[in-house]
Image (spheres, helix red, strand yellow):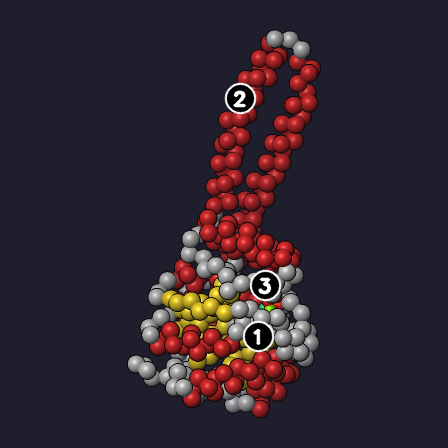
Amino acid sequence: MERPPFKLCVVLPCYNEAGVITHTVHTLLGELDSMATAGLIATDSYLCCVDDGSRDTTWSEISELARAHGNVRGIKLSANFGHPNALIAGLFSNHREADILVTIDADLQDDVSVLTTMMQHHHEGKRVVYGVRLDRQVDVLPKRILAAMFYRIMRLMNDRTVRGHADFRSADSGVIADLERFGEANIYLRGLFPLIGYPSAEVHFVRKERHAGESKYPYRKLLSLAWQGITSFSTAPLKFVFYTGLVIFVLAILVGCWVLYAALSGDPIEGWASLSLLVIAFSALNMISLGVIGEYIGKIYKEVKHRPRYIIETTTTT
Ligand code: UDP
Ligand code: MG
C-alpha cells in the first residue's frame, strides 16, 4: 500500500434499531478487524452509533456495546431529527479525529464486504466512494417504480445524481469538512456529495433484506424524501410553473379570440360549458403554481431561522 493505514470511523444512524444494532456492531467489528489485519485501516478505527431519538432500548444497547468494546462509541440525540441529520451529527462529531468516514444503515441492508474495496479506492487517491445498489430486487414493485421515476426526474434537473446510491458511502475527513460548510437546513446528502466534487469511485453491491425490525421509510416518508431531493436541489419546478403559465397564456389568447368570434356571430350562451371548464383548468393551474412556490418559500423560511440541525444529548465516554 502506498499510504499508511487510515483511521476509519463508521457512522451508523439508529432509530428504533434495538433488534439489530448488537448484531450489526459485531459484524462491523469483524470487518474492521480483517481490514486492519490487511493493513488497509488503522487498529484504532472505530464505530460511532448515532441514536436518533429512539423510543426503544437502542440507546441502552449502544451504551452496553460501548462499554464492552473499546472501539464502539455512541452519540444520543435529544429527539428524532431524521436520518440525514443523524448522519451529519455522526460525521461532524468525528471528522476531526478520523481520516475516512463511512456512513451505513444500522440494519445492514448494505453489503459490508465492499468496505474493503472502498478503502482500496481511498488508498488509490479517491476521496469519495459511493455504494451503489446493483438492483432493487429486495424492494417491492411500487417502490422500484417510484425510485426509477425519481432518478429520471433528478437526472433531468441535475446530472450529477448517482443512480442507485443511497447513504452508504465513504469520504475522507477533508470532504466532510467541506460538507460542514453547507449550512442548509434542508440537507439532501445524496445530492451534496456529487456537488462537492473531487475524484470519486463507485462500488457495486446487491442490497439485502433488513436483518431485523421494520423499515422506517414508509411511502409517505419516501415521497417526502423525493420531494425534498427535488426542491432542495433545483428551482426547475419554479421554471416549469412559469413556462406552463406562459403556454396557457398563449392558449388563453387563442381561446379568447374564439370566444369573441362566437359572441359576435350570435348565440353566446352555448359557450358556457367550455368557459366553466377553462375556469376550472386555470384555478387548478393557479393552485399548483402557488403550491410549488409555497414549497420554496417554506424552505426559505426554514433556512432563515438557522435552527440547529441536531442536538446531542449525551455521548458514551471514551
Ligand atoms: N433512521 C434514522 N432516523 C429516522 C429514520 C431512520 O436514523 O428518523 C435510520 C434507521 O435506523 C436506519 C437508516 O436510517 O439505520 C435507514 O432507515 P430504514 O432502514 O428504515 O430505511 P429503508 O432501508 O427501509 O429505506
Ligand atoms: Mg433499511
The amino acid type found where label 3 is placed reads Gln
- Figure quadrant of residue 3: bottom left
Say what secondary structure mark 3 lies in: loop
The foreground one among 275 and 42 is 42
Say what secondary structure mark 2 lies in: helix
Disc 3 crowd rating (10 Å Cα; few below 14, some 14-19, many 20+) is few
Please identify, in this view, whether the residue under mark 1 or under mark 3 is nearer the observer. Answer: 3
Residue ID at (49%, 32%): 246
The amino acid type found where label 2 is placed reads Leu
The tag on residue 108 is: 1
Q: In this view, does 101 lie above or below 274?
A: below
| Residue at mark 2 to residue at mark 1: CA–CA distance | 59 Å
Residue ID at (38%, 77%): 120
Residue ID at (57%, 13%): 261
Residue ID at (52%, 74%): 111
Disc 2 crowd rating (10 Å Cα; few below 14, some 14-19, many 20+) is few
The foreground one among 231 and 39 is 39
- Residue bearing mark 3: 137
Q: Is residue 27 left or right of residue 269?
A: left
The tag on residue 254 is: 2
The amino acid type found where label 1 is placed reads Leu
The foreground one among 212 and 113 is 113
Residue 135: where, in percent of width, then height? Answer: 53, 63
> Sequence-wise, which precedes: disc 3 or disc 2?
3
> Sequence-wise, which precedes: disc 1 or disc 3?
1
Q: Is residue 105 above or below residue 253?
A: below
Q: Is residue 255 above or below residue 83?
A: above
* Ligand 1 image-quadrant field: bottom right
